[in-house]
């Protein structure tokens, strides 16, 4: 840019006006340009920086990545990038803050490019530093929001246990896992007996409270982190447990029934008991019987249907 | 196409393996675990012959990082990684939990840096061993299909353009990935490269 052209501003004003750190380093790593942004964020004035060796100036605080980049530019004419994702804070630069606060190190993105001198002299290196603190903050916020949304998407809003969507996804993984590890897989479908009359008798508010209690009681029966317990529909729950023999699965199903009966929730309109009960359909598959396209769901569902038609408050095994 | 003799191909492969070694060192330093990078093979093709099948590329997307460099010869260097593998590497490098799909959009800057490290290491090895001086542009990142890439080479190809295809093996503790480093250069540039490789050989033999 020629300063003879009456633009109404000087190159210096532009260099010092940009919201970007600008440094030019010569072939002996001496600093040839240091803009105002650099002074503000490093605490080093032009006078302190100019003609100093950049490595000496930062007193050994330069990261290996930064030095490698500089070497690539000066010695090989290859531009270098330092992304904020992989480097965070290569230079000791700080966000501008109130004097009283402890200084916060700035996240940076750095681009280093070679500049060939017009007269054919040695190469210099232009270093551009941008403050990526805002994008890093935004990234963190987006990730935590997306984590929260993911959690919400797989949780049943009323009971707080997993929902059907999560179950459907995990079911496929569990089937594959069992096939690969040659282990049994048991599926339990659990239905609260005469829940509609219960709701009619006590009202929906009490009904919801009871659903929550039942959900959490069933959930508490699980022993391993790989077990899955989800709300499958209105008053229907589903559990998936690996590595049970058929007998163990039946005992577990009976324990599920007992755990709900033990709650001793009064159910005056139930024809089968004076307290709230559940029916359970269970099916256990040996590894060589498991087919992804022939789901266990159907067998356990049939067993549950039989448990209900045979008078409820019982476990029925599909075999 | 035998534009290079066997020994010249060996010499060039060696040059790029030195570059790969330098890149591996830099990557290890960033990730904090051992990275092995090697260039097991190299071939030269006329750009008119290029198609995804010639390059034995499978379907899917590639993450590409390219830099144009100039010096005694001019070439466009393009680094290709199968997108998912490349992103897994970046994810490892960052210790990120983000899904691969999110990462592709999110981490363009980090992907560019990964490419920049490997390309710069290759170019610096070439500069040192062939005793030449090169200048290069900033890396450009894009996601393309094999067909897009082949088309691009054919497009910028007048018939006398050549491409140098290097196979790259990248091994991290958890992942093994393969990529290609491709140099697109004119026949004039190719013959200058050959001259430099011959000089290098006459110096060491």
Image: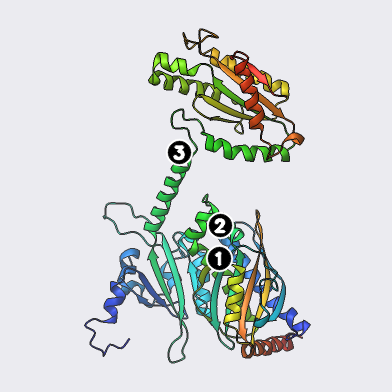
Q: Residues within 10 Å of mark 3 (few under 14, many from 20)?
A: some
The location of residue B99, given as percent across then percent down, is: 53, 51
Residue under the point 46% across and 23% down:
A212
From the image, tell me which residue sits under label 3. A152
Q: Residues within 10 Å of mark 2 (few under 14, many from 20)?
A: some
Which chain does the numbered disc 1 sit on? B
Residue under the point 44% across and 43% down:
A149
Which chain does the numbered disc 2 sit on? B
Residues marked 3 and 2, same chain = no
Q: Secondary structure at mark 2?
A: helix
Q: Secondary structure at mark 3?
A: helix
- Quadrant position of the C terminus of chain B in the picture: bottom right
Q: Is residue A145 in view from this perspective?
A: yes
Q: Quadrant of residue A198?
A: top left
Q: Nearer the viewer, residue A25 or B172?
A: B172
The location of residue A169, given as percent across then percent down, is: 58, 40
- Quadrant position of the N terminus of chain B in the picture: bottom right
Q: Nearer the viewer, residue A181 or B122?
A: A181
Which chain does the numbered disc 3 sit on? A
Residues at circles 1 and 2 in contact by the CB criterion of under 8 Å = yes
From the image, tell me which residue sits under label 1. B114
From the image, tell me which residue sits under label 2. B93
Q: Quadrant of residue A129?
A: bottom left
Q: Is residue A255 in view from this perspective?
A: no
């Amino acid at each position: 840019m020629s300063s003879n052209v009456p633009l109404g501003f000087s190159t210096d004003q532009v260099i010092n006006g940009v919201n970007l750190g600008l440094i030019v380093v010569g072939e002996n790593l001496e600093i040839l340009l240091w803009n105002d942004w650099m002074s503000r964020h490093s605490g080093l004035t032009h006078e302190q920086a100019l003609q100093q060796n950049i490595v000496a100036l930062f007193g050994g605080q330069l990261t290996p990545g930064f030095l490698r980049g500089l070497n690539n530019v000066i010695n090989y004419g290859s531009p270098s990038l330092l992304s904020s994702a992989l480097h965070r804070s290569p230079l000791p630069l700080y966000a501008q803050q109130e004097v009283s606060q402890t200084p916060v190190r700035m996240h940076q993105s750095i681009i280093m490019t070679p500049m060939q001198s017009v007269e054919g002299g040695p190469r210099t290196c232009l270093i551009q530093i941008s403050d990526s603190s805002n994008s890093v903050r935004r990234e963190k916020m987006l990730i935590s929001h997306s984590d929260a949304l993911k959690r919400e998407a797989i949780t049943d809003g009323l009971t707080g246990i997993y929902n059907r969507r999560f179950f459907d996804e995990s079911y496929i993984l569990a089937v594959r896992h069992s096939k690969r590890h040659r282990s049994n897989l048991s599926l339990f479908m659990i239905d609260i007996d005469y829940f509609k009359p219960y709701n009619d008798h006590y009202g929906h508010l009490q009904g919801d409270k009871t659903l929550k209690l039942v959900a959490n009681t069933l959930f508490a029966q699980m022993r391993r982190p790989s077990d899955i317990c989800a709300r499958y529909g209105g008053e229907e729950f589903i559990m998936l447990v690996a590595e049970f023999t058929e007998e163990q699965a039946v005992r577990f199903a009976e324990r599920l029934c007992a755990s709900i009966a033990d709650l001793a929730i009064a159910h005056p309109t139930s024809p089968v008991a004076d307290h709230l009960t559940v029916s359970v359909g269970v099916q256990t598959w040996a590894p060589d019987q498991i087919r992804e396209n022939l789901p266990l769901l159907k067998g356990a569902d049939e067993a549950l249907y039989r448990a209900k038609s045979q008078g409820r408050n019982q476990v029925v095994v599909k075999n | 196409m035998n534009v290079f003799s066997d020994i010249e191909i060996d010499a060039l492969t060696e040059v790029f393996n030195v570059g790969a070694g330098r890149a591996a060192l830099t990557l290890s330093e960033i990730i904090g675990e051992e990275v092995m990078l090697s260039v097991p093979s190299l071939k030269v093709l006329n750009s008119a012959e290029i198609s995804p099948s010639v390059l034995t590329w499978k379907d899917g997307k590639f993450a590409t990082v390219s830099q144009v460099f100039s010096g005694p010869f001019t070439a466009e260097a393009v680094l290709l990684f199968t997108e998912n593998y490349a992103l897994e590497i970046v994810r490892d490098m960052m210790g990120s939990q983000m899904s691969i799909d999110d990462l592709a959009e999110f981490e363009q800057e980090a992907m560019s840096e990964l490419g920049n490290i490997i390309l710069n290491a290759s170019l610096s090895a070439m500069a040192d061993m062939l005793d030449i001086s090169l200048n290069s542009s900033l890396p450009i990142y894009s996601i393309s299909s094999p067909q897009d890439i082949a088309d691009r080479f054919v497009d910028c190809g007048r018939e006398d353009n050549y491409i140098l295809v290097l196979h790259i093996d990248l091994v991290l503790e958890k992942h093994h990935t393969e990529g290609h480093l491709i140099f697109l250069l004119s026949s004039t540039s190719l013959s200058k490269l050959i001259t430099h490789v011959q000089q290098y050989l006459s110096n060491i033999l």
